[in-house]
Image: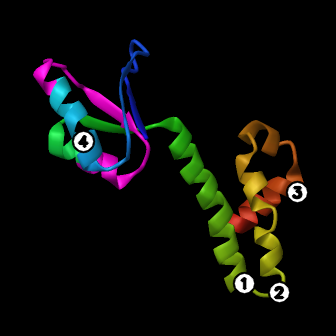
Amino acid sequence: MTILVDLESGMVLDAVEGRSSEDVAPVFKRLKRAGAQLKAIAVDTSPTYRKAIRTHTPGVAIVHDLFHMVQSVNKALDEVPRMGQARLEGDGKNVIKGIRFLSLKEKENLSKDEEQTSKLDELLA
């Protein structure tokens, strides 16, 4: 199901069954007929939504919603250290261990912990 919401008013514009470009096409056509002046459209990272937006509203900015952007960053923070650790041997594996939580710390709090600062410097090197 796809729910289209006016982010300024919070009003639900439409709800359609499915997530494909074809499923949402009638909504874009209705908006066009109504003379909607779209400046930007916030969507998740699904390629089908980007396709529909480019097809039916060319030139309108595509903005990815915060939830899905944070989800992508978290996924990378989980995967990248695992990939690096798989390639390292011996003491090198210890450099990456715990890096996810270290990378999420506020810089001000990190500077108070010399061991963590040293570990981050070692990782970056």
From the image, tell me which residue sits under label 3: 115
Residue 115 x %, y %:
88, 57
Q: Which mark is residue 53?
A: 4
From the image, tell me which residue sits under label 2: 90
- Is residue 48 on the magenta stretch? yes
Residue beneath the point at 83% across and 55% down: 116
Pointers 2 and 1 in contact (CB under 8 A)?
yes
* Residue extending furthest toward the bottom: 89
Q: Which of 99 and 77 is in front in this view?
A: 77
Q: Which quarter of the picture shows residue 26?
A: top left
Tell me which numbered mark, 4 or 3, is placed earlier along the sequence. Answer: 4
Q: Which of marks 3 and 2 is in front?
A: 2
Residue beneath the point at 13% across and 18% down: 35
The magenta stretch is: 32-51
Residue 63 x %, y %:
37, 37
Residue beneath the point at 72% across and 77% down: 85
Residue beneath the point at 67% across and 62% down: 78
Inter-mark Cα distance, 3 to 2 = 20 Å
